[in-house]
Amino acid sequence: MLDKGLSQQLAQHLKLLRQPVELVASLDDSPKSRQLEELLGEVAALSEKITVVRRDDDERRPSFAIARPGTDVSVRFAAIPLGHELTSFVLALLQVGGHPPNVSQEVVEQIRGLDGEYDFVTYLSLSCQNCPDVVQALNLMSVLNPRIRHVAVDGALFRDEVEAHGVLAVPSVFLGGELFDQGRMTLEQILSKLDESATERAAAALTEKDPFDVLVVGGGPAGVSAAVYAARKGISTGIVAERVGGQVLDTMAIENLISVPYTEGPKLAAALEQHALTYDVDIMELQRATRLVPAQTPGDLHQVELESGAVLRAGTVVLAAGARWRQMGVPGEQEYRNKGVTYCPHCDGPLFKGKRVAVIGGGNSGVEAAIDLAGLAAHVTVLEFDGQLRADDVLQRKLHSLSNVDVLLNARTTEVAGDGARVTGLTYEDRTSGEQRRIELEGVFVQIGLLPNTEWLDGTVELSDRKEIVVDERGTTSVPGVFAAGDCTTTLYKQIVTAMGSGSTAALSAFDHLIRVSTPAAADTAA
């Protein structure tokens, strides 16, 4: 199963094992069990510290535990951990085998200090780029704290279990049999849900920070680019964001970033963070900005208030808050979100194998989603509001070649219907005749563009009628000392490469502003 190159890389990683590890398999006579048995055997052959034991003592088959003999330390996969989960498998091997985790001692102590018993189950898809973060976080927690147990379950492999729990979006995390959360989560986010006092402690620590020369709000390509360019000037720079990477984390394949023929969103996000850290940028994640308080007079400090209650101060601010998937805004959409309504075909597509689905939107993202889903779903219906598809010709030709895809033009979705637990259909208006029609289906994939994350700025900086921050060629906003970049602005094109360029422009403009207007933060830095 593992090619020669991958086996050699894995063998090098496994040299980091400090303690023996057992791979305890629960198998049956199915082809998937034979596939898992083969994978475990190949991995065990790469290190003398790894042995395979077959016990068939788990109800989920095929599955296996990674265990440290003679201890309670273990991690379980009800999956064949390839694809995006291969990294999760390798990290679990190393951590169970005694290799220290790449987290701070403070986080380690917080995990070990959690009281109570925690039984987590994560339902994942091997094609989901968001799932590994959650799986790896919970695996690490189960290694560090024996009162925490975690099983990662491949939804495509255990379809009956997924359907019994009503799982229609991944990752879906259950705690003690009840839904804990869905979607991408970091280790810190999970801890904050389990340890409520952590949020208060973090907010107090943030408020005590010295003023920044440049504070960047947003951690996507624009935000990180701005932070790197500012830090290279030798001035104090911070990034405050919910997550470093932003929309990039939800992007499967990136093929238009010049000099990088191909990469994937999570890899690019990790590279962005590492680049920022090489310049001593203070990265403050898991924080949502709720209010900008501009400086009242030249030379005063701007303030950014956060949802956690923290307040950050800075001589200049770069707004790079990015954008999010636009929603349809019709009845049933929110009620059935993650119950059939989804925004990520790569993540959730495998859960709809053999089902009837719809894709809302006929642009590039919508048509690409329909093409991908056609290989899994029984039938795909594309609904486009306009009288023609807006996707590139090459994508349209591919779409029309697929026998299980229908395209409806001049179609305005008016309602998502369901039975209370999951989607059962949708209603749309034929804009030509005005007739209301219904489609019976189990999934709705919304792909209708982006909405800027600027609600918290309304009334503070000038916004366009599309709620984008109005900027000039320098990234200057209507507020002196506040600049903006990326998808949240009136910049014409919304691409990673243009976001990076606008981020660097905004940072250079912020630096120019600092040297022309004396601020306390700038004066402290100069001293």
Image (cartoon, rainbow, N blue to C red):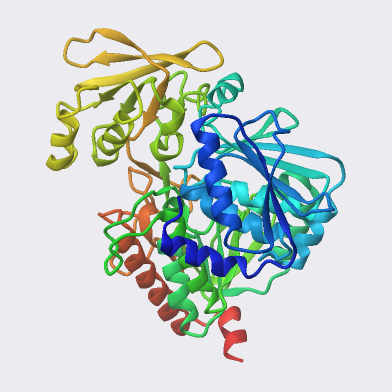
* Horizontal side of residue 95 vs 348, given as left or right: right
Question: Considering only vertical position in the picture, is 356 above or below 20?
Answer: above
* Horizontal side of residue 408 vs 20, given as left or right: left
Foreground residue among 465 and 403: 403
| Figure disc tally | 0
x, y percentage for residue 358? Answer: 33, 23
x, y percentage for residue 223? Answer: 45, 64
x, y percentage for residue 218? Answer: 49, 58
Quarter occupied by the C terminus? bottom right
Residue 242 visible: no
Residue drawn 51% across the image and 32% down it: 169
Residue with the most extreme bottom position: 527
* Horizontal side of residue 226 vs 208, given as left or right: left
Residue drawn 42% across the image and 57% down it: 3
Foreground residue among 153 and 226: 153
Residue drawn 15% across the image and 26% down it: 387
Location of residue 239 by image quarter: bottom right
